[in-house]
Amino acid sequence: RLPADMSFVQGALVEPLANAVHALGRVPQVEGATALVYGVGPIGMLIFWLARRLKTERVAVVDINPHRLGTAKELGADLVVNGSQSNPVQAILEWTEGRGVDFAVDAVGHPDCRANTVACAARGGTVVWIGLGGDPTELDGRSVVTREIEIKGSYAYGLKDFERSMSILAEKTFPIASFVSEARLEQGQSMFDDLASGASSLMKLVFTM
C-alpha cells in the first residue's frame, strides 16, 4: 500500500527501483567505486541513478539509444558510450587507463553485452547480470579465473528491497520527470510506437483517463 503522501506516479516506480536496489545489493562495495552500467533502459537507468546516489566515484553507461544516453549524461554519467558507434570494451578500458571497473552491471541480457561486462571488470571485480536473456554466453574462462572476477545473477527483489525503494522515493529527491511520462489514454498507441522505435527517451508511461 502506498503512503498517503506518495502519488500514483511515484508509486509506479517502486517496483522497478526495487530491482535496482536488489542488483546493487549484490555488489560488495558501491561507494567510492568505478562502475559500468551496460544498457540504460528503465531498469538500467535506475541502477545507474542509484549507483550515483550511493556515491560511486565514477559511472559509465553503454547503450545504443542516443536519447537514453543523453538522459544518463544529464543525470551525471561520467562517460556515455554508444555501442553502435564505438567498441565499448576499448572505451571503458581507455577511460580506466587499462584497469577496468570495480563493478559492472548488465541490464540487457544479450550474450555480447554480458561478455563485455566481464571484459570490462578490473582484477577482483564484480559483475552482476540482471538482464534476462535466453541465449548462451561465451566467456574466456581462463581470464575470469586469473583475474578473479566474481559473476553474480540478480533476479527481481525481496521485501527489504521493496521497502528500501519506497523509502528512497519518499525522500522526494528522485528525478521523476526523467523517468516517467504522463499521457492521456488515447495517446497510448503513438507513445508505444515512439517507445518501440527508440525515437524518444521515454522510460515509463503512466496513462490517465
Image (cartoon, rainbow, N blue to C red):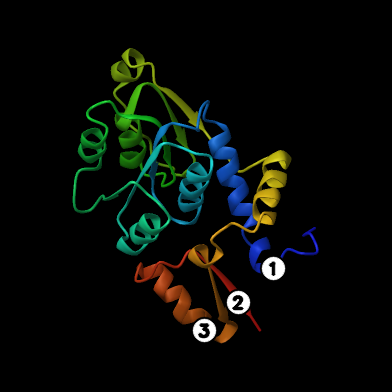
Residue found at x 29% / y 30%: 119
Q: Nearer the viewer, residue 142 or 68?
A: 68
How many marks overall? 3
Dot 3 and dot 2 residues touching (CB under 8 Å): yes
Local packing at callout 3 (Cα closer than 10 Å; few below 14, some 14-19, many 20+) is few
Callout 2: 10 Å neighbours few (<14), some, many (20+)? few
Q: Which residue is mark 2?
A: 207
> 7 and 155: which one is in front?
7
Q: Which residue is mark 3?
A: 187
State the residue at coordinates (20%, 37%): 90
Query: What's the distance in space between the residues labelled 1 and 2, CA to CA?
Result: 11 Å
Name the front one of labels 1 and 3: 1
Left or right: 73, with 15 as reference point? left
Q: Quadrant of residue 109?
A: top left
Q: Which residue is mark 1?
A: 8
Mark 1 nearby-residue class (10 Å; few <14, some 14–19, many ≥20): few
Q: What residue is rendered at 44% in x and 45% in y?
A: 107
* Discs 1, 3 touching: Cβ within 8 Å: no
Q: Nearer the viewer, residue 45 or 196?
A: 45
- In this view, the residue farthest toward the top is 146
Q: Position of residue 145 (x, y in %)?
A: 35, 14
Residue 201: x, y in percent?
A: 40, 66
Q: Find numbered disc 2 in the image and state the secondary structure of the residue it sits on.
A: strand
Of labels 1 and 2, the one closer to you: 1
The amino acid beneath tag 3 is Gln
Marked residue nearer the N-terminal end (3 or 2): 3
Give the residue type at disc 2: Phe
Residue 180 found in image quarter? bottom right
